[in-house]
Image (tube, rainbow, N blue to C red):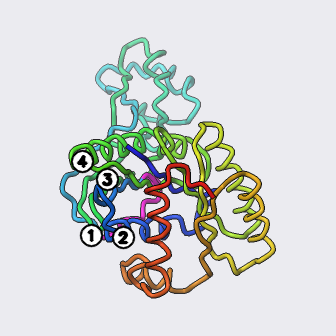
Amino acid sequence: MREIVVLSGKGGTGKTSVTAALAVCAAQSGLAGGPPVLADCDVDAADLHLVLAPTVREGHEFLGGDKAAIDAALCQSCGLCREACRFGAIGGDFQVIEAACEGCGVCAYVCPAGAASLSPVVSGDWFVSETRAGIMVHAALRLGEENSGKLVSTVKKAARAEAKRLGRDILLVDGSPGIGCPVIASLGGASTVLMVAEPTLSAVHDIKRVHALARHFGIPCAAVLNKSDICPELTRELAAFCGESGIAVLGELPYDPAFVAAQLAGQSVAEFAPGRYQDMFTRMWRRLACDERCAP
């Protein structure tokens, strides 16, 4: 199975807009094997569902980690747990402040009465849904929870299972911005990284870090240059970097209010403005789907 992971060095570069447009055009392309299975792995700020309007077929709770609890009936109020906790998570009544607890377990370790213990908590939910672009696996963290990469791995594992069930051979993944743990989890098993870059100083710097991360794992890269007309000088710098690094530039997108209008309408830009973008994204998808290394 081929896995195409869409990444960006920073948020706001248009990564999800590109992913949604590719997904819709892939579903309409008629390529053998059918449309890809979609995985929204940007679980900290998932928004692919805003464009593709999924109908949830099944939902599951995600146990992301442990939290401490103190049994008041056993507690001797000795204060050892409060002294040992480095996160200030033990309140004045020797009850755990859940929002502050990091699940390190030191309270259970030092408690002489066995009153403190750890237990798994529900950190989020993940779903298998149907969309007009095909099956999508996506997730949402609950309030105050954070993503360590485990939820990303859960989403990808479920998406692979759906692809296998349906006989699909391509997974299209909307990854997280940056290069942290969620991104590394998104890259597990990836065949190609599609980097979405824009010509701003921070984005140019960060896309180079994404490329270095993908290169570390031996994953070939392609690129889409978004908002390419807002700073021609930095667009030329991005294009030169891609040329020097052997990164295929699959297309350049202008700054266009149609992208925001499409999101407000609950559509991909390829649906909202097909005359401008449908053929462009269809060509990008055919190249990604048929050319394993996306050679220039």
> Does residue 232 appear to the left or right of 77 in the view shown?
right
For the residues labelled 1 and 2, the Cα–Cα distance comes to 7 Å
Outermost residue, left side? 57
Q: Secondary structure at mark 3?
A: strand
* Distance of label 2 from label 4 (alpha carbons): 19 Å
Classify mark 1: residues with Cα within 10 Å, few (<14), some (14-19) or many (20+).
Answer: some
- Under tag 2, what secondary structure? helix
Question: In the image, is 138 to the left or to the right of 193?
Answer: left
Residue annotated with mark 3: 137
Q: Which residue was labeled with disc 2?
A: 24
Front-most of 89 and 102? 102
Q: Earlier in the sequence, mark 4 or mark 3?
A: 3
Which quadrant is the C terminus positioned in?
bottom right
Q: What label does residue 167 carry, if any? A: 4
Labels 3 and 2 touching (C-beta < 8 A) = no
Q: Nearer the viewer, mark 1 or mark 3?
A: 1
Q: Identify the mark nearer the N-term, 1 or 3.
A: 1
> Which of the two discs, 4 and 1, labels the residue nearer the N terminus?
1
Label 1 to label 3: alpha-carbon separation: 13 Å
The location of residue 27, given as percent across then percent down, is: 32, 67
Q: Secondary structure at mark 1?
A: loop
* 3D distance between C-alphas at marks 4 and 3: 16 Å
